[in-house]
Image: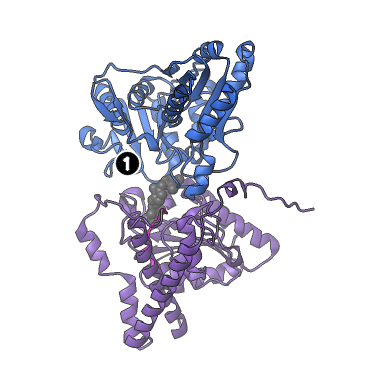
Chain colours: A blue, B purple
Amino acid sequence: MPTITYAEAIKQALVEEMRRDPSVILYGEDVANFGGIFRITAGLKDMFGDERVFDTPISENALVGGGVGAALTGLRPIVELQFADFLFTAGDEVVLKAGMWRYGHGGAYRIPLVVRCPSGATATGPEHGQCPEAFFMHAPGLKIVSPSNPADAKGLLKSAIRDDNPVLYFEHKLLYATRGEVPEGEDFMVPLGKASIAREGDDLTLVAISAMVPKALKVAERLAGEGHSVEVIDPRSLVPFDRETIIESVKKTGKIVVAEESYKTLGVGAEIGAMLMENALEYLDRPLRRVAIPDVPIPTAAVLEAFVIPNEEKIYQACRELLS
Amino acid sequence: MDNKLKLDIYRKMLLSRRLEERIAELIKAGQVGGFMHAGVGQEALQCAAIATMRPDDYLLYAHRGVAYWVARGIPIEKILCDLAGKEGGTNRGKGGVMRVVYPKLGVLGESGTLGGCFPIAAGAGISIKVKGEDKVVLCFFGDGTSNRGTFHEAVNLSAVRKLPVVFICENNGWAVSMPTERSTAVKDISARAAGYNIPGKTVDGNDPEAVYAAVKEAVDRARKGLGPSLVECKTYRLWGHWVGDPENYRSREEVQKHWRRDPLPRFERKLLDEKVLTDESRAEFEAEARATIDKAVEFMRSQPFPKPETALEDVFSESTAG
Ligand SMILES: Cc1ncc(C[n+]2csc(CCOP(=O)(O)OP(=O)(O)O)c2C)c(N)n1
Ligand SMILES: [Mg+2]
C-alpha cells in the first residue's frame, strides 16, 4: 500500500470522485489557478476544465449557498472554504440553508454538498484557527467528519462526496503533511458514522478527535510503558456519531477521557458525557474527563496558543488522574 | 496640499516602506513568527487618506501593511511587538500584527474575516450620529473584499441613515491569486456608489495628492452630516500576498511594469522637483527612518513574551454601566 500525505490523500479522493462522476464540481477562493492556499487542488483545473473547477470572488455566503442551489438541482458541489472559521461567515447558508432546506420542504430535495474546512490552530489567532465542529453538531441536518490520518481523509471524503446530504469535512491543517498508508483505487471508502479503534486497551478509553488522535496515541504508548492499557477511539465522524463503539469500550474500561481542539463548554466531550449518562452510567467507575480549550478564543501569540490548545501533557495528566 | 503636509506624508510613506522591508527580513530570518501581508506599493493612498483624519476620528484599516498605523501615529515598536507576539504591543499577544488596536486614536481594530469591517464601520457611524458628534469613520478594504455581502448591507445602511463613513477601496489588482477583472463585474468599484445613491470616485491611488483631495472631500461631506462616500484608489500590490508567497499566478513583466509606478520614488521625484525635498533632507529622512526602526527592533527584542496564563484574560469585561 502506498504511503502518502494527508494532503495527497484528500486530493486523491477529489480526483477519483471527479473522474467517476461528472456531476461533481469544485470551487472556492484561489482553488483553480493557484491550486488552493494549502495547495490541495493544484492541477485539478487542468484535469477537469474550468466549468468544473473554478475560482470564485471572496463571497462565502454565495459559495456555500451556491453549493446548496447547485446540489438541489443535480450537481454534487465541493466547496472549499479557506479556513473552517469562515463557516461562521457563511452561517446562514451553512446552518439554515444546507442544514434545513430539505427538512423545511418536507424531504422534497436532496442536498449532496461537501464543504471542505481547513481547521486547527497554527498561531493565526481567533478567526483562522478554530476546530468548530461542535458548533455545527448542534445544528440539525449537517453531517460532520474530521479525519485524523491519510487513509481516513481519503475514504471519508469519498463517502462524503457520494452522500446525498450536506457534509462538513474538517481537514486539520497540522495534519496535511503527516504520512500514512492509503489504499489505492476507487472502491476504497470509509463509511460515515463508524468510529475506528486506533489502539486497543482495557484500562481506560481515550476518545480523540482529528489532530488529537496522533497525540492520544503517543500518550497511550507512554502509559503502556507505565503498565496501563489505553484504548484510543477515533470517532472520525461526529454526525452521524458511532455511540456503540464508545459505549462498548467504556463497558470494558469504566473510564473515559475525551481530547478535542474545541471549546470545553458544549464541545464534543460534553455530548459524549451526556450520551454516556443516558446509556452507560452504570459502567463508569470514574467521572469523565475532558481535555479541551478553556472557554476563550484562540490567541495568536504562540506562547498563549500553546497554553490553551490541548497537548500530550494535558491528555496524559487527565488519563493519569483517572488511572490512579 | 501645503509643503508641510506633503513632507509629512512622504516621511510616513518612507518609514512604512523601510519598516516592511525590515519586517520581511525578520520573518525570513525566522526571528519573528508573525504573519504579514505587506503593503509595499500602497503606502501613498494609505498615508494620504489617513492624513485627512482628526485625532478623534475612527479608523478601520485593512489587512495590507503597516502604513495605516504609521500614518495614524501608532508607535512602531508596538507594531513590532504585536508582530512578534510579545508584551509591549497593542493587543497583549491576543491578535498578532493583524489586530493592532489603538483606542486613543480611534483605531478600532481589524476583522480577521474579510468584510467584517463594513458593518462595524456603519455601527461607529451610528454612534457618532446618535451622540451628535462631528467625527468620521474611515473604512479601508481591498477590491476582493468588496465582493463580500456585508459591503452591500453596510453601505446601504450607511446611505439611508446618512452615516459619516468614508469607504476607501484599495484596488490593487489582485486578491491573493485572483485578478480583480475576474472577481469583480464592474471595472471601477466606485461605480457601485450609484447603487446606494452616494458619491463615488476613482483616483490614482499612487498619487497621494489625488487621494488626499478625494478623501478630504468625502470626509468633509460626512462631517457635515451629508452621509457616506465611496473612494476607490487604484494601486498595485508590489509584493506577494504574504511574505513568502510563491506568486506563480502573475507574470514578472506585470510586476516589473508596476514597480515603475512605485509611489514612493514617484512622490520623492515630485517633491525634489518642487524643491520641497532636497537631497540632504531626503538623506536625513532615510537616516531618521533607519534609526527609528533600529530602536524599535531593539525594544521588541528586549520585551518578554506574555505570561502563558494571560491567555485566559480579556474574554469578558468586569465593568458594568452601574
Ligand atoms: C471572509 C474571508 N475570506 C477569505 C479570507 C482569506 N483572505 C485573506 S486576504 C484575502 C485576499 C483579499 O483580497 P483584497 O480584498 O483584494 O485585499 P488585498 O489582499 O489585495 O490587499 C483572502 C482571500 C479571509 N480572511 N476572510
Ligand atoms: Mg486586492
Relative vertical location of residue A145 with respect to residue B217 in this rendering, above or below: above
Residue toward you, A240 or A309: A309
Residue type at mark 1: give it.
Gly
Q: Can residue B145 be seen in this view?
A: yes
Report which quarter residue B288 is drawn in: bottom left
What percent of the width, then of the height, locates residue B245? 30, 52
Magenta span includes B38: yes
Q: Quadrant of the N terminus of chain A?
A: top left
Q: How crowded is mark 1: few (under 14 residues within 10 Å), some or many (20 or more)?
A: many
Q: Give the magenta-colored segment's residue range.
A: B33-43
Q: Considering only vertical position in the picture, is B17 above or below A78?
A: below
The residue positioned 56% from the left and 51% from the top of the image is B307
Q: In which quarter of the image is the C terminus of chain A?
A: top right
Residue B64, percent from left and from top: 41, 59
Q: In which quarter of the image is residue B242?
A: bottom left
Give the labeled residue for mark 1: A36
